[in-house]
Image: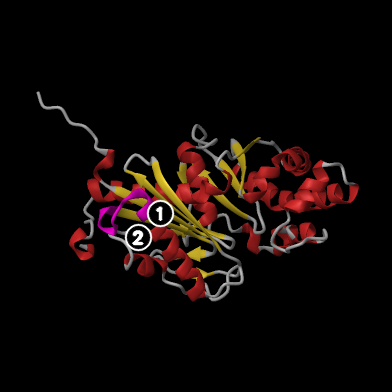
Amino acid sequence: DRRYRFRAEAGRVLGVDIGGHKVLALVADLEGRVLHSARVAVTPRLDRRQRLVAVDDAVRAALRGAGVPPSRVWATGVATTGLVDGTGRVTLSEALPEWTGVDLAGHLSRQVNGPVKVENDSKLAALAEAWRGVARYASDVVFLLAGLRTGAGLIIDGRLHRGFGNAAGEIGALPAARWIRAQEHLRSWPLRDPDEVEDVFVAAREGDRRALAIVRRYVRDLAVGASALVLTLDPELVVLGGGFSRSADLIVDPLRRELDRWCLRVPEIRVSEFGDEGVALGAVRLALDEVDAVLYGAAELVSPDRFA
């Protein structure tokens, strides 16, 4: 008898999260075990060229730290804010300057071997939760990416739901959903940096009445769009993730009360355990899905000789 063993060490995949405040790159084996990570701090004010330089720096640092040459990368998943088309180009991004139109797949393909797949960050955060997060046993999930920008990802029947034009879950584009202005409540607190709102949550946790009122107003606006998604999907779970999930102790209970006001059935609310790495982990899963398609489909890996 012949015996076969899956060799997770045979190749490597790369997951990259390109955000407003950081670029995070993860190198993983073919089972998704993260071998090394690299983080580069950025700001929302960087132009396209500066942000792409940060992407290159994070990718090179992650590969170097893992001892992996670009030729051993079998596939790369990339997460970004905004809408993305099937070619890996950002078709619309209002959060980052000069980001609409950037060809991320083309750019990363010049850095590493293998196919490059690009997806919206909220969708990939939802994918990470369904893969190995708090939603891994749930079939229908609404994922809320709560931070200085609010987004959503949907899991339906255990699969990431993209929609016909890859715009599913973009309810924040509707002004009546109130996600556009939700985080502005937090900026009404006297902040040292308009992009660092953690002081509001710290003050609220210490019992400051004004801070508590600000957080409540933020949660009320967050709950409007969330309620619309819950009423539409009737999910088993709502998962709270993103940077503000670190303050879930101040958000979850009032969010549950707000959902109870509007929804016919309030699903269980759970908090992501990934912190700010969930999006990058979803990008790793996207890369692994591409490897599966290559191994079991008709696609071909790019020859590693290109990077020899």
The residue that appears at 38% across and 69% down in the rendered structure is 107
Question: In which image quadrant can residue 43 be found?
Answer: bottom right
Query: Magenta includes 68?
Result: yes
Q: Is residue 3 positioned above or below 249 on the image?
A: above
Q: Is mark 1 on a helix, strand or loop?
A: helix
Q: Which residue is most to the left?
A: 1
The disc labelled 2 sits on which kind of residue?
Answer: Val
The residue that appears at 43% across and 64% down in the rendered structure is 57
Locate the C terminus and report the quarter of the image it occupies: bottom left
Q: Which residue is most to the top?
A: 1
In the picture of the structure, the residue carrying the numbered disc 2 is: 116
Q: How crowded is mark 1: few (under 14 residues within 10 Å), some or many (20 or more)?
A: many
Report the magenta residues as a range. 62-73
In the picture of the structure, the residue carrying the numbered disc 1 is: 62
In the picture provided, is 301 more to the left or to the right than 31?
A: left
Residue 129 is situated, as x and y percent measured from the top left of the image, at: 51, 41
Q: What element carries label 2?
A: strand
The residue that appears at 28% across and 60% down in the rendered structure is 113
In the picture provided, is 38 more to the left or to the right than 206?
A: left
Question: In which image quadrant can residue 246 be found?
Answer: top right
Q: Which residue is most to the right?
A: 209
Query: Magenta includes 219?
Result: no
Q: Residues within 10 Å of mark 2 (few under 14, many from 20)?
A: many
